[in-house]
Amino acid sequence: VDAQVVWVSGHDGTYARTTDGGRTWIAATMAGEETLQFRDVAAFDESTAYLMSSGTGDQSRIYRTDDGGGTWRLQYMADHPEAFLDCMDFWDRERGLVFGDVVDGVPFILSTNDGGDTWTRVPADALPPAQEGEGGFAASGTCLVVGPDGRAWIAAGNAERSRVLLTSDWGESWSFTEVPVVGGTGAGLTTIQVAASGNGIALGGIIGGDSLRVDNVTLTADHGVSWSHGGRLAMAGPAYGSALVDLPSGAMAAVAVGPRGMDWSPDAGATWQGADTLTYWAVAFADSDSGWAVGPEGRIVRLSFVGR
């Protein structure tokens, strides 16, 4: 949320929160939901947050708290046996989107305009046809991101060709563009970020191919309309999560995380260098001095481009 307030989601119905910049954390399990896998979290302050669980059918759910996790209200439970939610994002406290794997031949996208009190599936005639098996990877919560003026982008994979789905009308209608990243079953895009300037980055790779090096970084300069090859990551294997960071110098940095570590780029994805070899699932920044990466067994690491 900012330099002081950070929320984290996890497996086994767990979540965590700090309100003092990471000096202390409160970790908890949602009562009665200890089997859920919370693959994404979105928060607006220390009190209000959403948790999204991933799983087949009714294991895909959305909860909201308005009292810092003291109580949670179930807002959505998938009622289609093939539904599988991957990631979510919000423009503001009222408007948000959720993306899941293909159902009935089209991408599965939900939207809300009332803070999640109701979630409505985007109709098939507003969506491009899906490729067979297409969906997202519920790894980092960044396969869907929103931007100014009703824009949003989805990083899709697990199909013959890797694609970015995009909207400019608050999710009411969608188009797509193919990107030069490896595709196929168990491969494709996993994460995407687009800045207000229109510069963006999308990454992925071959899931499970932790020793493989493939073209898995692509860049845009026109709000996701067209994409070109980015630099090769220093780490092998796929990237699961990413972040763009505005630096005090005026430059834009990028960070990518995955099973084989963490890389960073001083030029928004054109070149990369290694930062760590530990496994990380997700990364996010509030500003250049307040970044966070999370990994297995509850690992939480603070990141800064400013130095101390």
Image (tube, helix red, strand yellow):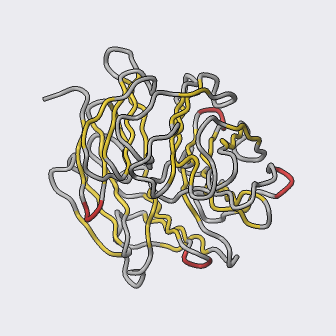
Residue 26 horizontal side relative to residue 30, left or right: left
Q: Nearer the viewer, residue 305 or 69?
A: 305
Q: Position of residue 247 (x, y in %)?
A: 34, 22
Q: Identify the image quadrant of the N terminus.
A: top left
Identified at 37% across, 45% down, the residue is 257
Question: Which residue is farthest bottom?
Answer: 32
Place residue 65 in its image quadrant: bottom left
Question: Which residue is farthest right?
Answer: 125
Identified at 68% across, 79% down, the residue is 81
Q: Position of residue 38 (x, y in %)?
A: 43, 67
Q: Identify the image quadrant of the C terminus.
A: top left
Place residue 169 in its image quadrant: top right
Identified at 49% across, 73% down, the residue is 73
Q: Nearer the viewer, residue 135 or 246?
A: 135
Q: Nearer the viewer, residue 183 or 17?
A: 183
Q: Is residue 34 above or below residue 5?
A: below
Question: Which residue is farthest top?
Answer: 249
How many numbered marks does the figure carry?
0
